[in-house]
Structure formats: structure tokens, C-alpha cells
Image (cartoon, coloured by chain):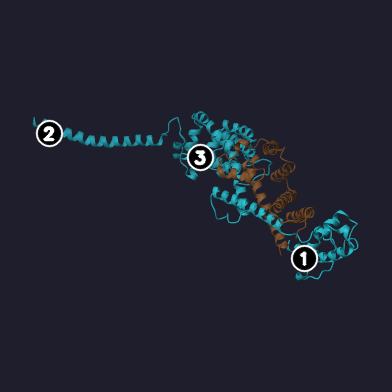
Amino acid sequence: MESNAGTKETRSNLTASDGGEVTAFESLQFTDEIHRLILAPTTDNSSSFTALLELPPPQAVELLHSPDSPKLIAASPPNVEDFQGSFRFPSNSGLIERDARFSLFSGEANNSNEKRNSPESKNVSANPEKNVKSEPAETESSQPLVSDPTVEKRSIKRKDRENKVKGSTKKSKTVANENSEDAEKLPYVHVRARRGQATDSHSLAERARREKINARMKLLQELVPGCNKISGTALVLDEIINHVQSLQRQVEFLSMRLAAVNPRIDFNLDSVFTSESGSLMDSNFPSLVMPAIWPEVQGNGHRQQYQHQWHLDTLQQPVWGREEVCNNYITPENSLLTYDSSANSATLQANHLKMEL
Amino acid sequence: MNPSSLKSRFATRFLRALTQIHARKPICSSSPTEIFRRYRRIKAAADKSMAYSVRSRKTWTGAVLWKLRSRSCGRRSAKTSTFIKSQQAIMKRTRHEKQNKNTTTTTTTGEHGVGFGVEASELRELVPGGEAMDYCNLLDETAHYIKCLTTQVKVMKKIADFYSL
């Protein structure tokens, strides 16, 4: 009996040791399985982009070339609309570079991709601007893209990884971001969709209009003094309104003033402004000259003098009124006197006014 | 002084008008009514000469001249509403000519005061011919109007100072 126990013990010992060995062996097997699990692609057939992002590029390429690609194509239509907002694809060299990096390409695939790349990007780079009219053109150009979205997805994913953007569903925006700003001069409005902005035609037109309005508000701010410091459209508009009102009131006051002032002499400054030199009329024909042009006579040039003459002039005004009506009926003395004095003062004043204006 | 600037054009025209006004009715009495009538005429002359001096085509100049003409022809014809309607027709035509199909948001008369509050309507009242314009053009017209008003004020101030020495 005791031997049985011993043997049992030994057997158990053996089994224990064996179990140890067995467990060691089994642990090796487990690690193998674990390795296999790790190495196997963990992604499902749904192939979400974020999952793809975690994988190194060759495996991503493998996945894309796998029968999952039809599903990717199916997923692309929502991005086509995003493409409408995109303007220029990265340069040919960049794409070719990326293509070259993917060593897992089959020879055919590589050639076809490159071929398809260059015409597409060329087409799009020929129309770098976003026009409302060119939308159909862009949809046309994007249709060949639908047939081969894999290239786009790959390049865009590269950028995503570079930019470390996670979960950004609007990949076209990142493409749009990298576009340069030089514009061709086309006769219609160019608007660029910026990052995170809607790209439908209505909002673009709205944005163009808003930019126009903002530019004009800036101009107005410069015109109106004291508007530069104010921020906010409502206050600026208030200032503009006040300024316009004050200007209109000033015009009214000035015209009141001009109406109230006694006009000393009726003189026509046309001659002065048109810089007609030389005497225009002889002093022998004052009647013809009367409301019209005064000859330029050398005046005395003293204010007091022609103030004195001014009194004379005002007295003579009714005489002039008569003289206007009947041209030939002039009292020569009066006319000559008034003529000379007023002529002097007229030219003096005309010269003064010309200087000031 | 630039001979062909807005300032000089306005100055010549205005002075000519002034002389005409003074020549027509020499001051016989300095009663307030006379002065008031003269003031009216002078102001009309100033606005008219300003409107004529402007080279580029602007809406407000047409509006100013229209108002003056309607006032001078008596009040029988030309209400402001008909003027506005004609202006709107012109604006729509020019809009269609210029901006073919680009602006999807057609800014029609229904756009008045939309989204810009009280100030836009006030501005429309101030600027002549402002009721028939969309907001964008209204700002344009305001800028030009302010520029012309400032030149007008400067020239008139100098003339008034000169006269009242």
C-alpha cells in the first residue's frame, strides 16, 4: 500500500513536473497564437478609415487592394460633394512620390494610377478657381475620380497622418487648405471656401457679398473722420449717418449765409478761372459788359479803398438794374465812375477768391 | 488748383449760378421772406451744380436733379414713388447686365433693411435716391455723396467768408 502511495506520489510528481513541462510547452503555443492574432489584420471588412490610419502603409495598401475596395468606392460619394469645394490637388510630383513609396503596387496598378493622376490633376489645376459656373465642370472632373478613389484616399490619408487630424471626415478641406492663393483674372467673382465653411453656391455668393460690403464699410470709415477707432458695424453706421447729417446742415447754413450777405458786386469769375489774360472789354462799352465779364485792370490793392467803393457800389445798384434793361441808355459819368471803382474791386476780389479756392 | 477737378468744376458752376441769382433780384429788402427765398434758390443752385459737376454716373445725382425739377415744375407730377419705381427698374436692368448669374441671392427691393437694422433705413432717407438701392450700392453712393458734400461745404465756406469780409 505504501508503495502505491509512493508511486502515486511519484506519479503525481511526475505529472507535476510533466505538467510543468506541459505548461511550458503550452505557454509557447499560446504565445504563438497571440502572435498570430497580433499580426493578423484586426480590422473588419467595414474598414473604417481611422482603423486604417493605425496601420502601417503597406498593410493599408493591401487592404485597399483587397476585395474591400468596392466598399470604399461605395463610401466615396459623400466625398464627391466635398470635392466640389476642393480646388487644386497637390502637385504631380508629390503624388508620384507617394506612389513610388508604395512598393506593394502591382506594376499595372502603378502605371494606371500614375496615368490617371496626371490628367486629373492637370485638369483640376487648369481650373484653380471656384466659380459658380464651373461647378458642372468640376463635377465632371470628379467623376473619373469616383472610379478610382483609392489614389485620392491614399494621398489624403497621408496628409491626414501628417497633419494628425483624426476623424476629419471632410478630407477635401485639407486639400483645399494647401492650395495656393494665386488667381486668374476671370470676369466673375472668385470665392474660396476656407476650412470649415460650407461650400454650396448660396453661401459662397453670400460670402462674396459680405466681403464686398465689408470692403465698402472700410472705405467709408476712412472717409468719415474719427471712425477708425470705432469697432462694430452699427456704431460705424451711426457715425456715418451723423456725419452726413452734419454736412447737409452745413450746406444749408452756408447757403443761408450767402443769401443774407449783401452781394457787393456782381462779378463773373469765369474769366478768372479760365485764365483769360488781357483786357476783355474796353472801358468804353460798360453797358455790354455790365453783368458779364470785367476787364482786368490794375487795381490799387487796398482794402480800405474798395470798402469805400463798396458803399458807392451799393448806391449804384439800382442804376445798374436799369442799365441791364436798356443797354444803350447810360449816364456815362455814373457808369464810368462806378465802373472803374467796381472794376478795381472786382478784379481784386476775383484774384483773392481765385487764390483761396 | 486743378482745373478739371470736382472742386473747380463745382466752384465755377456755383459761382455762375450765384451771379445769376443776384443779378435777377438785387437786394431791395432784407426781409426774412426774401432772404428765405434766396436761400432756397441758392441751396438749389448748389445742389444742382454739384450734381452736374459729377463725372461718373451715380444714382444720387439723378435723384437730386429729379427732385429739383419736380419741385420747379410745380407739384403736379413726379411723386417720389414713381421716381423710385423707375430707379428700381434701372437698377434691375443694370444688375442683370453686370452680374449675369453670379449672385444667386438677388438683392431686390425686398432687401431693404433686411438684417441691417435701423441705420440702413436712416441712410436711405439721407442719401438722395437711397430708397431704390440695395445695401451694397447704398454704401457706394454714401461714400461718393460724402466726398461731394465735403467739397461743396469747403467751396461754399470760402465763398461766404470771402463775401463777408
Q: Which residue is mark 1?
A: A311
Q: Which chain is cyan?
A: A
Task: Identify the residue at horizontal 60%, vertical 56% (top origin).
Answer: A225
Residue annotated with mark 3? A157
Identify which amino acid the numbered label 3 is placed on: Lys
Identify the mark nearer the N-term, 3 or 2. Answer: 2
**Label 2 crowd (10 A; few <14 / some 14-19 / many >=20):** few
Check the image and report above or below for A12 versus B67. above
What's the chain of the residue with tag 2? A
- Residue A83 in the image, given as x and y percentages of width and height: 57, 36
> Mark 1, residues whose alpha carbon is within 10 Å: few (<14), some, or many (≥20)?
few
| Residue B35 coordinates in the image, percent (x, y) | 70, 54
Please tell me the numbered disc located at residue B117: none
Give the camera-side residue of A227 and B155: B155
Cα gap from disc 3 to disc 2, whole angstroms: 69 Å
Among numbered discs 1 and 2, the one appearing first in the sequence:
2
Q: Quadrant of the N terminus of chain B?
A: bottom right
Q: Earlier in the sequence, mark 1 or mark 3?
A: 3
Horizontal and vertical percent for residue A58? 48, 38
Q: CA distance from mark 1 to mark 2?
A: 155 Å
Q: Quadrant of residue B102?
A: top right
Compared to residue B102, the image places residue B3 above or below, namely below
> In which chain is the residue bearing label 3?
A
Q: Which label number is shown at residue A6? A: 2
